[in-house]
Amino acid sequence: MLFMIKASVLSLTAVFALAQAARAAPEPEPARPPPNAAVALKGVEIGDVNRNIDACSDFYEFANGTWRMENPIPASMSRWSRRVAAREANKQRVRSILEDVSRKKDWPGGSSEQLVGDHYSSCMDTAANDAAGLAPLAPLLAQIDAVRSIADVQRLISRLHELAVFVPFTTMGAPDYREPGNFIENIVGGRLGLPDRDYYLKDEPRFVDARAGYLRHVANLLTLSGTRGAEAAAAAASIFALEKRFAAASLDSVAAADQAGTDHKMSFAQLEKMAPDFDWRGYFDEAKLPRIDLNVAEPRLVRQLDSELRVTPVAIWKLYLKWHLLESASPWLSAPFAAESFQSSDHYLGKSAAEQPRAELCAASVEALLGEALGKIYVQQYFPPAAKAKAQEMALNLRSALQDEVFAVKWLDPGTKAKALEKLADTNVQIGYPDKWKDYSSLTIRRGAVWANVAAGRRFGVEDDRQQIGKPTNRNLWALAPSSPDAYLDLQLNKLVLPAGFLQPPFFNLDASDAVNYGALGIGLAHDLTHAIDASGSEIDIMGRPQAWWTETDRGEFAKRGQCIVDQFEDYFIEPGIHHDGKRVLSESIADLAGVQVAYRALMKSMQSHPVPVLDGFTPEQQFFISWGQSSGAAMRIEAQRQLISDDPHPVPKFRVIGPLSNSPEFRQAFACKAAAVMVRQPERRCEVW
């Protein structure tokens, strides 16, 4: 997919940060002066074009070759492009906002500016953080020290879950896999200290080294908290042993992400029977969760928890809970804790990188905890109402163009075609920022208290999520901040979310021609719209339920046409002897081909009422294709290309750009390519699916 895919079950470490707007309140669109009519319409990035190259021979080099030549890959990165550079620019926009609002100390209490400004200021006040040392955690550490029984252990697990310290399991809301209209409670695997169960269980040298480094890291943090050296090492070993048992009972990352494989819906009574030694009634009552049907994603892990409550000494549980609290809070404590937290990746993953600047860490914290408060300010400065209106217009035009394509396709069964059109009509494309902003009125943020602010923000996010349980699923909740440079597609809820931070150049520019915008954002949008109705979306009905709605004949016809794409990409080599796996990139490459085709049709229709002029010597049609080549082009180290073709469903940038264009008669016409040109596939080899 062009954009990030989001599973409907949210990631554990981000629950508190994601948009679960339980108490959303209407907010008028931000005030913004109208666009400057005197601004000249912008065409493609003319300086990126390599005019020494024939577009019909090597369009990739033609469209962005000069940019790649003049912008070498930074030493710390494996790829570099306008898209990657845009992410860095977005970080600077967010940081600029935070620096500006944090300078003022008298914003109205509870305003977006006060919340984000005071949290950013407290995070950046490293002198105050260093002076506080471990004191901010003292009350919680005292509670852990006071634990005397397994009942106390369970109460502390509940307390840590309120702070989004999700060990050894957690509960979180998500749409019911089989009835997505219902938002139910999910009991899922908690955080392991190492990235995956393999790190605990496998004997490959890299895993052995990682375990040794991890044990040092655990001991180091415990030592910083006051545990003596020898005791810290012994404690680390005990913690690791408990985590290893949980890891052995856990699913690997691939299996854990499989919604069908983790679908184990049951009643509250069945949960109690599965793990009778855990006080589920007390946990649910304290969390104010209804005792209704729920899902247990990993039953084996829950049974392991029950066993550990019977056999693991309370003293070991205390060490385990203390360690995970320290690990979660360390970035927000004094410098020694923050440094150990960062260096942990060196300790157990063998990575070596420059330490993340404090300003970047603090900005990320604001975006995670107060995303929509930050988003209000961001859109006032960088995403005017006219931009939202333009992107919404494009989305409607693209959906209409795709509906026309589906209606005209001959290989799809009439009944299937009707369902596809119905599903497209129901697709929810959300642009820029939520229609209703999150209400933060119950949240208190103050200066000089970074950990207290982090804890308050996490509690707010966890409570926000819990308040949704037992209610109809709200399709309008956002899982990204409006300032985020990412976007996501949720196939189960049939929605596509494009934040304002994503709708920036090179994807979208209010001052650019429609041809440029349709060639970048338009192709990406059309690409993802097709996923709702292609082989991926055909397994999910209009209600989001796991139900196949294509006929077997439809699947056969789709596969037959897809084989052309498989054969095409098998012939794309990144170096001698190493080529793409056509089946691996099939789904994304079909969507790219459809994206180009649909976005081009939408542009042509739009130009009937909004003509696009020739700009910088390029016709509207040429601008469209060049924009695709520039927004999707990237310089990429050969090592990264080798890795990508081994495990990524997307082609490398060069072949992602030229693959669909070489199948496009409109591309050939736009650049007057001859029949024998490299960028023109012969009619008998030209691929077409939709």
Image (spheres, rainbow, N blue to C red):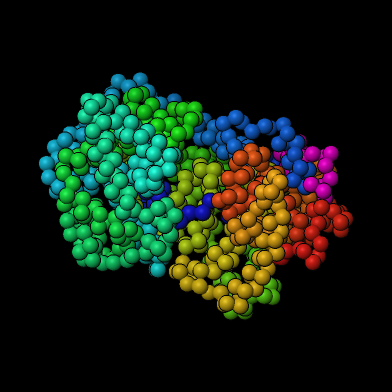
How many labels sit on residues? 0
Q: Is residue 537 visible?
A: yes
Q: Nearer the viewer, residue 100 or 616?
A: 616
Q: Nearer the viewer, residue 13 or 568?
A: 568
Q: Is residue 56 magenta?
A: yes
Asked if 331 appears above or below 172 in the picture, the reply is: above
Q: Nearer the viewer, residue 225 or 44?
A: 225
Asked if 164 appears above or below 176 in the picture, the reply is: above
- The spot of residue 456 in percent (x, y) is 31, 39
Quarter of the figure with the N terminus: bottom right
Query: Which residue is rendered at x = 23% and y = 27% of the image?
Result: 230
The image quadrant that residue 181 belongs to is: bottom left
The image quadrant that residue 608 belongs to is: bottom right
- The spot of residue 34 in percent (x, y) is 62, 43
**Of helix, strand and loop, which mostly describes the magenta segment?**
loop
Does residue 510 appear to the left or right of 43 in the view shown? left
Q: Is residue 298 magenta?
A: no
- The spot of residue 301 in percent (x, y) is 29, 55
- The spot of residue 566 in percent (x, y) is 67, 61
Query: Which residue is rendered at x = 12% and y = 45% of the image?
Result: 149
Does residue 149 appear to the left or right of 202 in the view shown? left
Does residue 599 appear to the left or right of 614 in the view shown? left
Query: Which residue is rendered at x = 30% and y = 63% of the image?
Result: 294
Asked if 258 appears above or below 321 in the picture, the reply is: below
The image quadrant that residue 107 belongs to is: top left
Q: Is residue 82 visible?
A: no
Quarter of the figure with the C terminus: bottom right
Q: Nearer the viewer, residue 393 or 231?
A: 231
Query: Which residue is rendered at x = 76% and y = 42% of the image?
Result: 61
Over which residues does the magenta segment extend? 38-58
